[in-house]
Image (cartoon, rainbow, N blue to C red):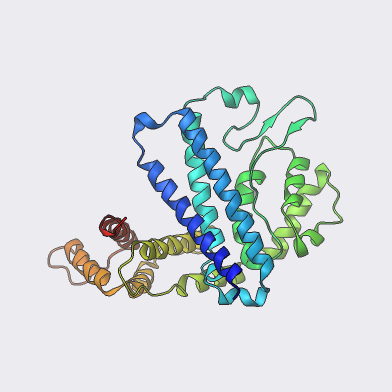
């Protein structure tokens, strides 16, 4: 691996950590600090950070062969998808909070402020300043692309079908671009384009296998580390949510997920978890099984504790 590629990968990890820290710090902000100007400043910083991350991802993806991706932790852990999830959560919260200060902006603009769209009279449309997901035709990319595009564009009732098709085509490259190349950008072709894409790439078995591979391939933690525990928690939560989005029933998976995640923890964290289970266990109970929600709450408490103990 070249030194330049190593540098780019380290930079992506740093940007992801900065994004998660920014979200955490914003949630802890005192109410008196939350003003419209403060939120708008945070939104600008968020977009700059995300633009840098997406550019870095494109450079990394272009620098290596598809067959070599499985050898890199960056692609194995699907850091790009995790980044998008945190980015979407942070941006949604910022825009929701901002709407409380500008309640009339939505009605005056003629469309949803939360998604950044505005329409004028007739056919003139002000296109959104928004980073749409990119898709080149890889099955492993499809579910992330589908979910984000569906929420941002497909379900946006303020957009016409021809606008949606314009945005859809702008997201593609490679095989996916070739699939829709012969469809002209007219109103009646949007539903056909979306149907072709879902028929080609919505391979539920393949997509669920990729998610399971990512879930079970997580690395074991050898030393106490707040960052490692957060990564383990975030990746697991992301995988489970992705499976739910595929309509996979995971309601009875708690005992499996708990065993998997606890086995990845460092020795001290496992000891403390056993103490926590003893505390949670009802008196005189011999068949108590902790839930994933209980383990998740413990992991959140554990990494916060380690963050307080780690030197600045």
Number of dots carrying numbers: 0
Q: Looking at the image, which is closer to me, 47 or 250? A: 47
Q: Position of residue 23 (x, y in %)?
A: 43, 46
Q: Would residue 177 appear left or right of 243 to someone viewing this image?
A: right
* Rendered residue at 75%/32% (across/down): 125
Out of 265 and 228, give the one closest to the viewer: 228
The reply to whether residue 233 is visible in this rendering is yes
**Looking at the image, which residue is at 13% across and 64% down?**
283
Q: Which residue appears at 54% of the width and 68% of the height?
A: 74
Q: Is residue 278 above or below residue 195?
A: below
In the rendered view, tell whether residue 89 sits above or below residue 57: above
Q: Residue at x 81, y 61 (%)?
A: 178
Q: Nearer the viewer, residue 27 or 242?
A: 27
Task: Report whether residue 247 is seen.
Answer: no
Quarter of the picture holding the C terminus: bottom left
Residue 16 on image: x %, y %: 49, 56
* Residue 36 image offset from top left, x and y in percent: 48, 28
In this rendering, would 105 be left or right of 200?
left
| Quadrant of residue 3 within the rendered picture | bottom right
Residue 191's spot in the image, x, y percent? 75, 49
227 or 244: which is nearer to us? 227
């Amino acid at each position: 691996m070249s030194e330049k590629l190593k540098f780019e990968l380290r930079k992506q990890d740093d940007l992801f950590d900065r994004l998660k820290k920014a979200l955490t710090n914003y949630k802890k902000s005192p109410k008196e600090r939350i003003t419209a100007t403060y939120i708008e400043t945070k939104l600008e910083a968020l977009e700059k950070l995300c633009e840098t991350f997406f550019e870095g991802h494109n450079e990394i993806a272009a620098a290596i062969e598809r067959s070599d991706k499985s050898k890199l932790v960056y692609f194995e852990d699907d850091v790009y998808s995790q980044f998008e999830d945190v980015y979407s959560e942070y941006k949604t919260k910022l825009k929701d909070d901002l709407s409380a200060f500008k309640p009339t902006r939505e009605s005056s603009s003629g469309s949803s402020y939360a998604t950044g769209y505005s329409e004028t009279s007739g056919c003139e449309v002000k296109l959104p300043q928004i980073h749409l997901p990119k898709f080149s035709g890889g099955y492993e990319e499809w579910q992330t692309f589908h979910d984000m595009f569906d929420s941002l564009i497909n379900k946006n009732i303020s957009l016409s079908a021809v606008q949606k098709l314009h945005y859809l085509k702008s997201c593609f490259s490679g095989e996916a671009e070739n699939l829709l190349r012969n469809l002209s950008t007219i109103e009646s072709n949007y539903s056909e384009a979306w149907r072709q894409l879902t028929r080609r790439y919505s391979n539920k078995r393949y997509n669920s296998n990729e998610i399971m591979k990512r879930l079970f391939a997580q690395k074991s933690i050898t030393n106490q580390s707040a960052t490692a525990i957060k990564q383990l928690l975030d990746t697991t939560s992301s995988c489970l949510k992705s499976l739910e989005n595929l309509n996979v029933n995971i309601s009875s998976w708690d005992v499996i997920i708990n065993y998997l995640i606890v086995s990845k923890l460092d020795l001290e964290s496992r000891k403390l978890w056993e103490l926590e289970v003893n505390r949670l266990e009802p008196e005189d109970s011999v068949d108590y099984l902790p839930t994933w929600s209980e383990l998740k709450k413990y992991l959140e408490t554990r990494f916060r504790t380690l963050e307080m103990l780690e030197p600045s």
